[in-house]
Image (spheres, helix red, strand yellow):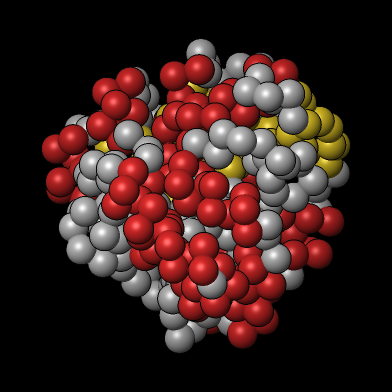
């Protein structure tokens, strides 16, 4: 997630912006209306254990395990719309709006990843029973790392286009303030450029426009607060607390230090989706869904689908991206 030099302070604006590169979007392989209309959902609110803010969520499907999807910075649960119909067929699917996003309340003071982790755990305790998998995109990656120790029936974590900077140490406060000064001076301009850097040539224009509009519309004070919280994330401590498998599904438009990450956390696996930008679940939903299905099959069935099965499932996406 770090963009510029090798310290998190020097890469903050890029981290902040590239961490958002750990963020949200709309679908290239099928329309959002089609994806969401195929599954009945129910919605609710859960009070945050951090400060009592209402956390919005929706649930669909049924099955022996629950998949909890967490969006990225300045996004909302709708960024997972292309996954609802696919996974609600065999699992219970829960989508969460983190505080300050979507239909959830905002106005908190603590925008740390640890606070968001407590929010996710509060929703899981209230609406989920049985085995749980947490799936987090961009900023949602560190959020699920922080939520993991608070969820008893956790089976594993799936981090999506994120954790590239998880080997870096948090910057000191002076360096952090200096790195964020340009964002505070021109929030709209910096964020606009940052979001543009998340796309590749094949990203559909309509999807680009939607992501730009959604992320740019977020509250600047909240956005900067989350940037500070993200930059202060202590990955070393989070990995020490982690006791379940972690799989990273990253796009190839930016490199992932897979070997170095595995040295830090041996129970880690990295999967790559080629030819897409920061939003693989929206830019190539069929390929992303197939990769996630394979991960879940290993955890719950003991074996993944064959290569031929996977190729057949992903061929339509290749034509649409």
Count of all numbered marks drawn on residues in the image: 0
Query: Residue drawn at (78%, 55%), measured in percent from left and top?
Result: 36
Q: Position of residue 306 (x, y in %)?
A: 39, 51
Q: Quadrant of residue 272?
A: bottom left
**Residue 253 placement: quadrant:** bottom left
Above or below residue 44? Residue 7 is below
Q: Is residue 259 above or below residue 178?
A: above
Indicate whether 244 appears above or below 200.
Answer: above
Tell me what residue is drawn at x 67 percent, y 60 percent.
218
Rendering coords of residue 269 (x, y %): 28, 43
Kindly give the residue lying farthest to the top in the view shown: 152
Could you tell me which residue is drawn at 71 percent across and 54 percent down? 78
Q: Nearer the viewer, residue 6 or 273?
A: 6
Question: Camera-side residue: 286 or 198?
Answer: 198
Name the residue at 18% across, 35% down: 264
Q: Is residue 23 left or right of residue 99?
A: left
Say left or right for 42 vs 154: right
- Counting from the top left corner in percent of width and height, residue 87 is at 64, 44
Image coordinates of residue 263 in percent, x first then y, are: 14, 37
Quadrant housing the N terminus: bottom left
Which residue is nearer to you in this view: 131 or 241? 241
Q: Is residue 65 visible?
A: no
- Residue 234 shows up from this direction: yes
- The reply, left or right, for residue 312 in relation to residue 80 is left
In the visual, does 107 lie left or right of 41? left
């Amino acid at each position: 997630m770090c963009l510029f030099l090798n310290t998190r302070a020097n890469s903050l604006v890029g981290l902040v912006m590239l961490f958002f590169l750990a963020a949200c979007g709309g679908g290239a392989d099928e329309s959002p209306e089609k994806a969401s209309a195929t599954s009945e959902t129910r919605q609710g609110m859960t009070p945050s254990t951090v400060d009592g803010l209402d956390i919005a969520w929706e649930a669909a499907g049924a099955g022996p395990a629950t998949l909890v999807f967490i969006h990225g910075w300045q996004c909302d649960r709708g960024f997972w719309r292309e996954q609802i119909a696919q996974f609600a067929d065999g699992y219970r699917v829960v989508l969460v709006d983190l505080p300050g996003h979507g239909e959830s309340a905002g106005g908190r003071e603590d925008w740390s990843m640890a606070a968001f982790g407590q929010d996710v755990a509060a929703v899981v305790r209230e609406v989920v029973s049985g085995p749980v998998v947490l799936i987090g995109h961009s900023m949602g990656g560190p959020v699920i790392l922080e939520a993991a120790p608070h969820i008893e029936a956790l089976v594993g974590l799936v981090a999506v286009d994120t954790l590239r900077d998880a080997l870096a140490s948090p910057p000191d406060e002076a360096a952090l303030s200096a790195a964020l000064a340009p964002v505070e001076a021109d929030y709209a301009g910096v964020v606009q450029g940052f979001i543009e850097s998340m796309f590749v040539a094949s990203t559909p224009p309509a999807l680009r426009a939607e992501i730009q509009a959604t992320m740019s519309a977020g509250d600047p004070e909240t956005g900067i607060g989350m940037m500070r919280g993200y930059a202060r994330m202590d990955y070393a401590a989070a990995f020490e607390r982690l006791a379940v498998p972690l799989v990273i599904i990253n796009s190839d438009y930016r490199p992932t230090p897979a070997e170095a990450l595995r040295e830090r956390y041996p129970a880690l696996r990295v999967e790559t989706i080629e030819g897409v930008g920061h939003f693989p679940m929206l830019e190539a939903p069929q390929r992303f869904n197939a990769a996630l299905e394979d991960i879940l099959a290993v955890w719950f069935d003991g074996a993944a689908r064959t290569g031929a099965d996977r190729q057949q499932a992903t061929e339509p996406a290749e034509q649409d991206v």
